[in-house]
Amino acid sequence: MESLNALLQGMGLMHLGAGQAIMLLVSLLLLWLAIAKKFEPLLLLPIGFGGLLSNIPEAGMALTALESLLAHHDAGQLAVIAAKLNCAPDVHAIKEALALALPSVQSQMENLAVDMGYTPGVLALFYKVAIGSGVAPLVIFMGVGAMTDFGPLLANPRTLLLGAAAQFGIFATVLGALTLNYFGLIAFTLPQAAAIGIIGGADGPTAIYLSGKLAPELLGAIAVAAYSYMALVPLIQPPIMKALTTETERKIRMVQLRTVSKREKILFPVVLLLLVALLLPDAAPLLGMFCFGNLMRESGVVERLSDTVQNGLINIVTIFLGLSVGAKLVADKFLQPQTLGILLLGVIAFGIGTAAGVLMAKLLNLCSKNKINPLIGSAGVSAVPMAARVSNKVGLESDPQNFLLMHAMGPNVAGVIGSAIAAGVMLKYVLAM
């Protein structure tokens, strides 16, 4: 009988909490969206599966060594940790002390847990290597750079302003998060508000990179919101675009783009990196990897490297990035009022970014002979190339012969640059406070 009781106690179902059950359902929902609806499947599928693994009771796959120690509830071991942190020897007090501790102290406690015989779960290791170090989003950015053609942007430099305007959604969302905190609706710190704001850039790797630096506890919710809304761009943007433009404006036919020389394409990533990084060093990691990937593509002398970055490397890193994000889909971090705020602010950020790009295009038309179709302004959010395709689709609805795709790619790639710069601004000023 005792053996049967021990067997039952060893089953995960006996330890399944309500929070874990809810998160298992959330993870299954992400898998359904990825497989059945094809919503950003390259990321949502590994994120959803990582969420399943993270919430299996007693498996501890997403727990660090220290978290495993706290989950074990050994009084002697808790007393040792509490003595180091000068707090009461109970799990709640230790967690509060760790939240206020310096990163160096947290690292010491993790090493102490390892010395006591605990090991981190495989997903926790993935997270530490892929996101904790910042490597995975940077490699993804390198791959995106290798797949990007700056030709449309160089052929029509004015579209850089459209990409810049679309970043207004980022900073407006930061203010929105701080406003919610000010009125006591949902508590957000400044670093958390900055991490949430980057959702407005519609750039998944940048959102993961910045939240990993500023608000790791919100990374799961931010990543899910960012990629979900990127997949919903064809639903979110068109109503805003149509509301802010007239039928006549949507029918504007733009001048055919000039041919961009190979020399221009080679020089641009180098000049861009130097100009931005020398003024804003905090943007150098993201923008540097992006420009390096693009230089490999345009130089034409390292085709093997360019092909590897565009295909094999980015695919491998995407797997580990998704599983690492899934490691943060645990109940105590995800099932919070903040998650609802993130989802709400995320869609508002997309809307503001879309509107700002369209309005900037209309403003440029007031002082320009060669008119810009305002629809391409919405492509300033950096969901490449989906936002550009949406601009083209809405334009074709008004004029079946008006093809805007290549024109829209200009602000689209400008949005990628803009989101990287915005992330650099956030890092510089938020970490300095």
Image: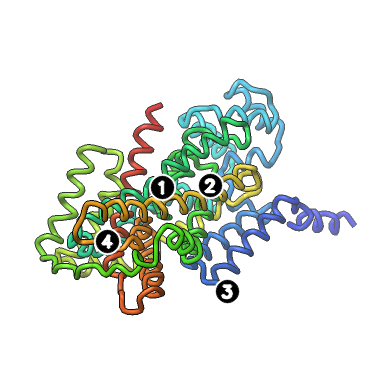
User: What amino acid is found at the position of numbered circle 3 in the picture?
Assistant: Ala
Question: In screen coordinates, is 1 left or right of 354?
Answer: right
Location of residue 415 (image quadrant)? bottom left
Q: Is any part of residue 129 visible from this angle?
A: no
Question: In screen coordinates, is 381 left or right of 116?
Answer: left
Point out the frontmost of discs 4 and 3.
4
Point out the frontmost of discs 2 and 1.
2
Point out the frontmost of discs 4 and 1.
4
Q: Is any part of residue 83 visible from this angle?
A: yes
Q: Earlier in the sequence, mark 2 or mark 1?
A: 1
User: What amino acid is found at the position of numbered circle 1 in the picture?
Assistant: Tyr
Vertical side of 176 occupied by 249: above or below: below
Question: In screen coordinates, is 251 left or right of 171?
Answer: left
The residue beneath circle 1 is 209
Q: Dot 4: within a 10 Å radius of its alpha carbon, few (fewer than 14), some, or many (20 or more) residues?
A: many
Q: Dot 2: within a 10 Å radius of its alpha carbon, few (fewer than 14), some, or many (20 or more) residues?
A: many
The residue beneath circle 3 is 36
User: What amino acid is found at the position of numbered circle 2 in the picture?
Assistant: Leu
What is the residue that sits farthest to the bottom in this orientation?
Answer: 400
Are the residues flagged by discs 4 and 3 in contact, CB closer than 8 Å?
no
The residue beneath circle 4 is 372
Q: Mark 4 to mark 1: distance in Å?
A: 33 Å
Depth check, front residue: 221 or 64: 221
The residue beneath circle 2 is 345
